[in-house]
Image (spheres, rainbow, N blue to C red):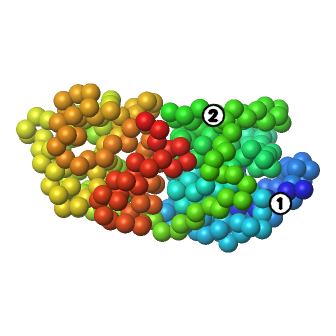
């Protein structure tokens, strides 16, 4: 029987009702008591990292998760992390950079409804996660939720209440699990062959900000963010561009910051298909004149976490650019 380490961080799946709202309180052992069938699939040990609403998750928690997995890596066949859904996609992206090329599965799951209520997705999601974690085809960081297996660099929470909380963005589902049957659509082989070693990292630079462009917004807001952060991701409209009327001063703000060594990435707030700054003058002129990076089909959650990982290692703009455009766990394919 395979051995799986279950790591607890909290979230709805571990929550109980309190007079002030849902709050994580259940331990992993209490959670496991609700799904005795898991003991037929594998041996489970538990490790409670924290018990928090994932609204409180931070880069320090991502580093602690990576450290915990590194320290236990060779004692287990796989890992199942219980996590709140609100920031699960960020954690999945962060772990995809902190633990690369893992031949063992690192599955993240949670639920929209607590495990101790009558109508809940907790039991199915957790059972499916263990079912997938013991499969020989499961490798690397993935989310298992509502019968879907989603690559860690491609997941986004797209429903705030219903059970189908997550979508896979600009990439297909890896597998589905229907009534306890695993149907694997995409098998990830290289570089995950037997005997391959994962690359572990722990250092992240959290000084990465996200600026959402809205019609008429002042470039002073972006300038302020560029003072506070080492890198700023601009979530623009459509395929990507900046307001170009002279009163906006976006071009000047961006050029001055890049000249000072700041990293700026253009992405889109449109959910699907990514950026292409060359299409319109509002993007093309900027792209051709300054050293701005572009997310293409990479999702915002992955862009932010990738920059934190890269800037944890280097601040040299050319090396940042090289690493940013290096495909890691199929995060960028454009
Ligand atoms: N607020 C909760 C959390 O992210 C929501 C959930 O788990 O579904 O921890």
In this view of the protein, can residue 141 be seen by the observer?
no
Q: How many marks?
A: 2
Residue tagged by mark 1?
Answer: 3
Instruction: Measuring from the top left, give residue 57's x and y in whole percent.
Output: 53, 59
Name the outermost residue toward the left: 246
Q: Does 87 sit left or right of 1 as displayed?
A: left
- Front residue of 58 and 137: 137
- The residue shown at (40%, 51%) is 324
Instruction: Measuring from the top left, give residue 291's x and y in whole percent.
Output: 23, 49
- Front residue of 146 and 199: 199
SS type, badge 2: loop
SS type, badge 1: strand
| Res 231 → quadrant | bottom left
Is the residue marked by circle 2 packed among few (<14), some (14-19), or many (20+) residues within 10 Å?
some
- The residue shown at (80%, 50%) is 134
- The residue shown at (41%, 60%) is 310
Q: Quadrant of the N terminus?
A: bottom right
Is the residue marked by circle 1 packed among few (<14), some (14-19), or many (20+) residues within 10 Å?
some
Name the outermost residue toward the top: 279
Q: Does 31 sit left or right of 212 as displayed?
A: right
Residue tagged by mark 2?
Answer: 173
Q: Does 59 sit left or right of 38 as displayed?
A: left
Instruction: Measuring from the top left, give residue 8's x and y in whole percent.
Output: 69, 61
| Res 143 → quadrant | top right
Name the outermost residue toward the bottom: 71
- Nearest to N terminus: mark 2 or mark 1: 1
């Amino acid at each position: 029987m395979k051995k799986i380490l279950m790591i607890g961080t909290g979230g709805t799946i571990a929550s109980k009702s309190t007079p002030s709202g849902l709050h994580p309180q259940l331990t992993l052992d209490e959670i496991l008591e609700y799904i005795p069938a898991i003991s037929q699939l594998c041996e489970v040990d538990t490790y409670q990292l924290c018990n928090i609403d994932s609204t409180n998750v931070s880069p320090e928690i991502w580093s602690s998760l990576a450290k915990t997995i590194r320290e236990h890596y060779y004692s287990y066949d796989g890992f199942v992390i219980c996590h709140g859904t609100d920031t699960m996609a960020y954690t999945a992206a962060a772990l995809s950079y902190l633990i690369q090329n893992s031949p063992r599965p690192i599955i993240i799951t949670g639920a929209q409804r607590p495990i101790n209520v009558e109508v809940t997705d907790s039991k199915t999601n957790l059972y499916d996660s263990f079912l997938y974690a013991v499969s020989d085809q499961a490798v690397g960081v993935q989310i298992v939720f509502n019968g879907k297996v989603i690559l860690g660099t491609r997941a986004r929470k797209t429903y705030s209440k219903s059970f189908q909380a997550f979508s896979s963005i600009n990439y297909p589902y890896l597998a589905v699990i229907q009534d306890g049957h695993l149907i694997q659509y995409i098998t990830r082989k290289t570089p995950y062959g037997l005997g391959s070693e994962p690359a572990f990292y722990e250092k992240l630079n959290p000084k990465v900000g996200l600026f959402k462009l809205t019609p008429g917004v002042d470039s002073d807001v972006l300038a302020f963010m560029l003072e506070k952060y080492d890198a700023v991701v601009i979530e623009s409209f459509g395929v990507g561009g900046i307001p170009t009327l002279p009163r906006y001063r976006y071009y000047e703000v961006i050029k001055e910051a890049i000249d000072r060594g700041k990293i700026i990435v253009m992405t889109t707030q449109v959910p699907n298909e990514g950026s292409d700054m060359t299409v319109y003058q509002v993007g093309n002129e900027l792209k051709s004149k300054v050293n701005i990076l572009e997310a293409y089909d990479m999702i915002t959650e992955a862009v932010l976490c990738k920059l934190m990982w890269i800037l944890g290692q280097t601040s040299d703009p050319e090396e940042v650019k090289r690493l940013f455009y290096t495909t890691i766990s199929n995060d960028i394919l454009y």
